[in-house]
Image (tube, rainbow, N blue to C red):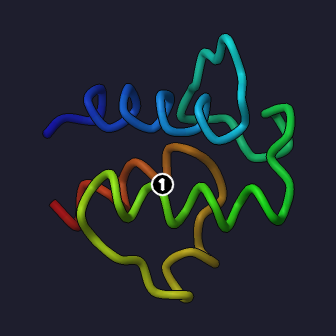
Amino acid sequence: MTEKDVLFKMTLVIKDILDLETLDLEKTMTAEDIDGWDSLAHISIVVAMEKEFKCSFSLGEIKKLNNIGDFVSLVLTKN
């Protein structure tokens, strides 16, 4: 799986959870850049990513995420 594949799947998941019609997800984006991404949505997004990519993330790993690029890299280490 490539970074592009992960980013594409993440975009679909986030659009679904946040009920967004459009989203151009970029690796430099943070939760603050995405409408509706609050603390409750964050939990839903992390759980959905674990399900989508068939992996689990530790609390320490999640705390280290600063942007979408970090999340993509984390997923790639799990697959």
Q: Residues within 10 Å of mark 1 (few under 14, many from 20)?
A: many
The quadrant the C terminus occupies is bottom left
Q: Nearer the viewer, residue 34 or 12?
A: 12
Q: Position of residue 52 (x, y in %)?
A: 33, 51
The image quarter in which residue 57 lies? bottom left
The quadrant the N terminus occupies is top left
Q: Residue at x 26, y 29 (%)?
A: 5
Q: Position of residue 48 (x, y in %)?
A: 48, 56
Q: Nearer the viewer, residue 64 or 48?
A: 48
Q: Residue at x 76, y 47 (%)?
A: 31
Please, what is the three-letter code of the amino acid marked with disc 1? Answer: Phe
Q: Residue at x 57, y 26 (%)?
A: 26
Q: Is residue 37 above or below residue 48?
A: above
Q: Position of residue 59 (x, y in %)?
A: 55, 87
Give SS at disc 1: helix
Q: Circle 1 is placed at which residue position?
A: 71
The image quarter in which residue 20 lies? top right
Q: Is residue 44 left or right of residue 35?
A: left
Q: Is residue 55 left or right of residue 46?
A: left
Q: How many marks?
A: 1
Q: Residue at x 51, y 66 (%)?
A: 47
Q: Nearer the viewer, residue 5 or 48?
A: 48
Q: Position of residue 4 (x, y in %)?
A: 30, 26
Q: Is residue 10 left or right of residue 2?
A: right
